[in-house]
Amino acid sequence: MNSYRAPRHLAIAVLLLSACALTGQTTTPQLISSAGGRLEGKTTLLDWSVGESSVSTMTLTSGYLTEGYQQPSILVIPIARPAPEAGIALTVSPNPTADQIVLRMQSEYTGQLHLRLSALDGRAVIRSRWDTGVDSHTLDLRRLSAATYLLGVFNEDQELLTTYRIIRIK
């Protein structure tokens, strides 16, 4: 009987050890694609892959949905609110927009404002001046592609007063 116990104990021990070594899932992302790689710099990390034939982004009322395995990291940048000492209150509408936005003065601010609409990479795509003696100012966005932009509002001394996130839709 002892001769039969040894192989059985050995089989149970091997089975338990192999079960401990196997994993069913991992928490690190893994991708099988036809090509890809990783590039690292001092301040930049770029992972890329080739092989997804169709990837799209949908705009929902609660946010965005992007298909595909490699999703971008989300970097949240706070949008500046006007400082109380700036003495400025504006409304920007409609937002999102397909063609234009209208800025309306909601305070007694006087003077000239400088407006700079920038792409998210920091490139200025529209620059405009607004004499606040006129109640509203319109920016035409029809020549811009559908994207998210930042509208910086500056005083005459080029000091940033406030920033608005503008969404241009198709």
Image (cartoon, rainbow, N blue to C red):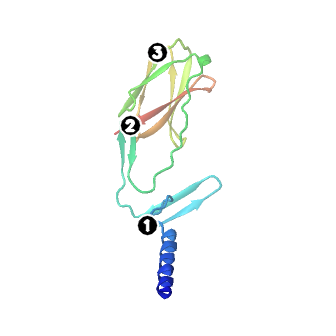
Q: Residue furthest top?
A: 108
CB atoms at circles 1 and 2 under 8 Å apart? no
In this rendering, would 64 be left or right of 75? left
Residue 156 location, x and y as percent? 60, 22
Q: Residue furthest bottom?
A: 3
Q: Residue at x 63, y 57 (%)?
A: 41
Residue denoted by label 3: 134
53 shown above or below 150: below
Q: Residue at (60%, 21%) from the top-left corner?
A: 83
* Residue 159 vs residue 82, the one in the foreground: 82
Residue wearing tag 1:
32
All told, the count of numbered labels is: 3
Q: CA distance from mark 1 to mark 2?
A: 31 Å
Amino acid of disc 1: Ile
Alpha-carbon distance for marks 2 and 3? 35 Å
In the rendered view, tell whether residue 66 sits above or below residue 160. below
Q: Secondary structure at mark 2?
A: loop
Pointer 2 residue: 62
The amino acid type found where label 2 is placed reads Ser
Q: Residue at x 45, y 64 (%)?
A: 31
